[in-house]
Amino acid sequence: MNQQRMRGWVPFFICVVGSLVACGKPMPTATAVPPAQVMVQTVRQTTTAIPLEIVSEIKALSEVEIRSRASGLVVKLMFQPGQRVKEGQPLVTIDARAYDEAVIDAQAKLAESEAQLARARQDVARYQPLLADNAIPRQTYDQAVAQEKANAAVVQARVSGLERARLDRSYAEVRSPISGQIGLQKLEVGALATAGQTVLATVSTLDPMVAYFSVAETEYLAYMKRVQSAKKSIKTNASYPVELVLADGSVYQHTGKVDFADRALNAATGTLTLRAIFPNPQDLLRPGMSTRVRVVSDVAENVILVPQRAVTEMLGKQFATVVGPDNKAQQRPIKTGIRQGDLWLVEEGLKPGEVIVVDGLQKARPGVTVKPVEISAQATAPATASSKP
């Protein structure tokens, strides 16, 4: 019985001894965690053009409604909707039978008047020698001369009538007045077209295209002053290029230029309508597109531009994470101005020479030590800005 009890205590004593031995050994120490690596950029001052985006509407440089100048039934359509057409290309044929009859009638009337003129001229030629011999009264000769002049006037009128009839006949074949792209036909074969009223289709040019937009008087004056200053400085007809921002937010690959300003301001809105012309070799732009034009509104010097991804927003306020000399991160409230591409213009909160976190904001919590790695400023600077350290 005693041996069985002793056997039960053996495991207990082994555990106790093991614990005492373990207590005598030193505990392993925790390994220090290295600081997180973040991508940073040194704040620099730049000189940059300040763009102004204005809502604009794309239109064709030339857009013509094709109207029939002859009345009659449409007998033939010689185009496909949406196709390219050339100036003078036949598009629509109007029933011309009535116009053909008018031409024949005018030709017959002209022939009749020419015969009457020939007879009157023969009378004058026959009476002239008789008048010299006093064989006929003077009055008879004068009447013959007057009749010749009257018949000549009738012939001239009939010639004009024939030309007008032929012109009216030519209107039965409607041709394109310009080269461009034609839209959907407004009438089908068999429909009645009325001269001067019925629109058959619309043709518009596609290259180049124009964008109409309106600017305030102060903005217009500032723009013109910069243009005049550029002309004086480089002795050319320099003007600032105009960019076009499409509906999806992308920038159109071709820049344009302002080629028209309205003669007067709109008294109701106090704005001036301008037009910018853009090349359209790929036919990307179409009339009626809603776009925004981006023009230079000012040139700012000694400003600070930071990447958008370096700015965080919380509760309607904006912050940037600044890395101090001790490599500790701190959150700094800032105030931004306009957005230029993927950059913010910072008005308050940052100074030149300070280091801000661009990538890795989730690792740079306030008070945490980080390992800053400088990134190239050229990778985030706009094409129009020049940096100053």
Image: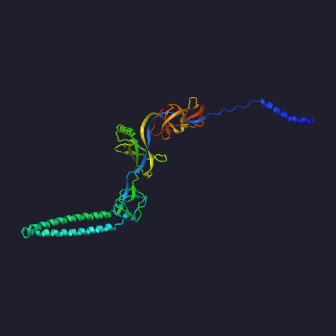
Coloring applied to the structure: rainbow
In the rendered image, the quadrant that contains the N terminus is top right
The answer to whether residue 101 is above or below residue 323 is: below
- Residue 22 in picture, x, y percent from top left: 78, 31
The quadrant where residue 88 appears:
bottom left
Front residue of 280/170: it is: 170
The answer to whether residue 181 is above or below residue 251 is: below
Left or right for 138, reference 251: left
- Residue 343 in picture, x, y percent from top left: 50, 39
Residue at screen point 9% across, 67% down: 138
- Residue 51 in picture, x, y percent from top left: 44, 40
Q: Residue furthest front?
A: 268
Q: Residue furthest right?
A: 1
Q: Residue furthest left?
A: 133
Front residue of 282/264: it is: 264
Residue at screen point 19% across, 69% down: 116
Q: How many marks?
A: 0
Front residue of 124/258: it is: 124
The quadrant where residue 364 appears:
top right
The answer to whether residue 169 is above or below residue 385 is: below
Front residue of 318/330: it is: 318
- Residue 100 in picture, x, y percent from top left: 31, 68
The quadrant where residue 40 appears:
top right
Residue at screen point 12% across, 70% down: 126
